[in-house]
Image: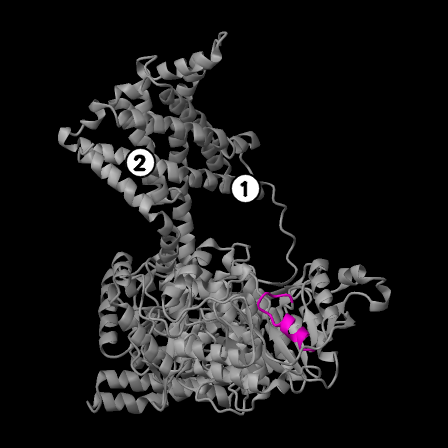
Amino acid sequence: AFVIKLGLLTYIVSMCMALPITLFPIFVAFRCGWISKTVKENWALRTGSFCSKWLMRLIPFSRVTVESDHGVGNDVGGNDVDPKPSIWVCNHVSAMDVFFMLASDRALRGKNRRPLKIIYWQELDNNPVTRALFHMCGFIPVQMAANKAGEANNYDRSSFKTMLKQIKLAFEEGFDVGILPEGQLNPHPTEGLLPVFGGAYSIARMSRRPIKMIAIHGTHQLWHAKHGMEITGNDVKLRCYPPLDGRLYASSDEFAETFKHVVGAFGTTGKDLARDELEGWLDGSTWEKMTTTTTTTTMSGLKDSYLILYNLGCCAGWGMILYYSIPYVFWPIGDDPASEIPERLASLYNSVEWLPNFLNIVQSLATMEIIHAVTGLVRSPAMVTAMQVSSRLVAIFSITNAPSSQDQWGAGLMILAWSLVEVPRYLFYVFALITGDATKKTPYPLFWLRYSLFYVLYPAGITGEMSVFLKAMKDDTCLNFFGPQFSGIVYGYYVTLLVVYVLGSPFMIGNMAGNRKSAMKKRFAKPPPPPRGLVWPLDKKGGRSSTGTAKAILAAAVSEISQEQGQAVLKEKNWRFGYVKHLINLVKGQCESPLTALSAATAGLDKAYEVFQFVSPDGSSVSFKEAMEAKNTERFNTGYIKGEGQRSNGVLEVPYKGKILSGEPLKAQIKKWVSYGTIEPSAGDAMIKVVDNPEWLDLSDRYFVLLGAGSAMGPFLVLMALGANVVAIDLDRPRIWKRLIDIAKKSSGTITFPLKVKQVMCKDDEELCKHAGANLFTDTPKIRDWLVDLYPGKPFTVGSYAYLDGALHVQVSLAMDAICKDLSEKRRNTSLAYLCTPTDLHLIPKEAHEAAKANYKEYSRKLYCQFMSIIGQGKFLKNNAMKPVKSKDGNNEYYMVNGISVAQGPNYALAKRMQHWRAIVARSKNCIVASNIAPATSTVSVVHNRTFAWAYEGMPYFKPYEIFAPETSNAVMSALLFFDLNQNTSSANPKTILSNPNQLFQYGSFNGGAWRCAYTVDTIGEASVLIYFSRLAKPYAPWAVAGVAVVVGKLAGLY
């Protein structure tokens, strides 16, 4: 401490001597008129900075650390060519602050920084050294009353006005302005900031300049605001925060809270906030969420109160009708209820004077539900709600204006069914709003009634409504309501309505049955198990949402191309549908150069390993990177079974439309696919090469590691038939292993798999299957360790074939990636295999691009395509041919296709993108990577979504699309894999030179026509579905025409 104190005193004395000496020539030059005031102030600032910096180097009394970026936002070092005028703010902990800032100014704010004028308390002029420095540098004084730390500043009004004028002049002369928002030295810097005042915000608002932040920590250890030169340490840290162009704050409170959390954290501890929290404060999202939450809470309270009152009112109204109707219809019951009840139902509507008008009022209130849905007060689909309410209103109109419909049993049945449905429905909504959980917290009897009464009451209500419509369409009073000239139109409307009821009612009841099943499943669902293994990180709300993490991963990759675009990814609000443009920017940016492509891929993967967590059985968690680097003491045992079947004939066989193609017929079919445009010529050439080299199909000495061995798109069946040695990884579920082991036993190949016990301890196959398998999520490090040591010296081909829905797909892709990464780096001659999807972004050959343009020109002339384009208002049938992208050096031009299907979601796109990243990174490290595009395939996981299944049926209308069966896709993709493993000139081989790493996916593409289609994959779905249904309806077209003819004839009075 004595040495530090001596050094500090020496520094202060040296500064007191150096400043007058160095500033004097500048002062003389200014007084003589040789330099202007602006130049004088600029030179004085540079001189002060020079003296501070070099004296600190000569007299090392402190250790100074400067951080100009923490890996978030843009480069905040101020190295932009033309920095904009800004207001700089900093915490204030010591009289030494200004000297450390002068000494570190270049490191903090960059070489192209604007000189900085600091606003200071005029009383500091009493010190001759600071007065000389401040006046020469043109610092801006302001007079105010002396106050204690933490008290608001009381400015002299005239002095304050002068200060504002000087600030304006400083900006015009090329200076920035600095201000200390705490107003005073902080006597307790380790306990947090003093109250932050809004002066900086006021100046920023009036001058319309952005605010940039600096934090300083440790100077109080040298010169404490309260205790003076009491040495407690000599580590000084300074930090400059992004964004590069500063921020325009919306309010004084927003600035104060941001400064308090960001600068306050660093000033107090010398460390930043956690990365996500820091980013949230710097980009304003945290403040936005805070203020939005407050506003939302208030608005939510008002909304819920209104909806509770609305639903209670409707419930009370229908309750009154029900309270009257039940006794009227069912009490007392005489000797002949079969005739009495219909008679009472027929007389119910007019049984009491108040009922018709009251029914009209209560049912008309339901129009508010349309408004609720349209405005977002409730989450009901607006169109469905409008249709349901409108049908009720038509029934009310009919029964009101058609006297003949009022005195028939259907009218009473309709009223009774409506009231029995609506009372529990509205009451259910009330309890859902009060409890906040419609599924689990509403009273079960009410829950059951809400989701069960429809089985009886929907058919009853529909029957009643249709009886009213049938009577109304024959009632002259109703038909002539709008005038006799419109009676035919009203009649036609009723006919149409009845047809819609007949055709649509089963769907409506079926939809409610589906809703009931889903609601019951959620009501009685078991709580999810605690997180184990590879999991998404916790978000700020304590959940494990995928959105923030997916953004961070993609932003890390995109930031390697453009920091601005990286920030745009993080700020994307509509992530579910807005992710596509960011992926397009990524792939376009990777075309700049091979180095850019690889650095983006590496950054994205590194970020994924950094943010994903791995939870141990005891509940503790570490980053996935740390989990994969840790040493494991547990090991899997090895199971092994050799097949007893005969090896196949060594001929490539492809099942296709009920036939098994091989030899010349297979070659002929391949050429047809190429000619039609369903596959690329490079894929056709590769498959024909495999047909001509049957020795490539002898797999007895090859080892294939299949991650997700039981996958529908995996090559397990083909490999076992060809006698391969398969190392199978799949879930530890007996039914999976029974299937895999049965197939292996009947084949000529071998299967090796992880076991939890030694194989000799399993007395039969049933017990063997019970202990076989491993979970890619929870056992990732153990699987990797087992594979690294398995069959030393044998070359492995590691295929990633596991697939899961939604966010789980990203997790399983990352787990497989960790295994692929380590095997490719730790085992010599390891190759990797992937199945790429056509619904992704790819570089494509120029020939495919030109074919897409030609097809677009052809299809744009078709009436059906023109019709769909018009009704889609630009959303349907978009041109598939994208504008080419040039490399940064201009020597290469790349063609792209955007095959992303937004419906598959951002998690699917991220999972496949991570596989792309690993493929090009591994290939750059001399690893063979077979990564070919598979066609659209009608697997169970895809067609279980009815919309996809319908679209698949209609897609072949758009040349050259073809949807393939799983067995065909398995065979052709296996053939392409064999080609890549055996042909040295394949793009999979790192010895083959590519001008850009992403061209790996350009060759050997069996894409099913997606690349050469006229329209993008994502914009032909609706048109394809309509084509499918039009084909279904074709047999019934004559009957429909006849029905229309009957209605038209009736309206025209022909009969």
Q: Is residue 43 above or below residue 872?
A: below
Which mark sits nearer the N-terminus, 1 or 2?
2
Q: Secondary structure at mark 1?
A: helix
CA gap, disc 1 and disc 2: 29 Å
Residue at figure coordinates x 26%, y 22% from the top left:
402
SS assignment at label 2: helix
Q: 159 or 646: which is nearer to us?
A: 646
The residue at which mark 1 appears reads as 517
Give the colour scheme shown. one colour
Outermost top residue: 335
Range covered by the magenta-colored residues: 710-723
- Residue 258 image offset from top left, x and y in percent: 42, 62
Residue at (68% x, 84% y) in the render: 795
Q: What percent of the width, then of the height, locates residue 834?
A: 56, 75
Q: Evaluate whether residue 249 shows in this view.
A: yes
Q: Nearer the viewer, residue 889 or 827?
A: 827
**Which residue occupies the foreground of this view, 719 or 612?**
719
Identify the image quadrant of residue 316: top left
Q: Is residue 176 above or below residue 417?
A: below
Tag 2 residue: 497
Residue at 55% of width from left, 88% of height from top? 989
Side of 252 where 827 appears, left or right: right
Q: Is residue 624 left or right of residue 787?
A: left
Does residue 975 lie above or below 553 as drawn?
A: below
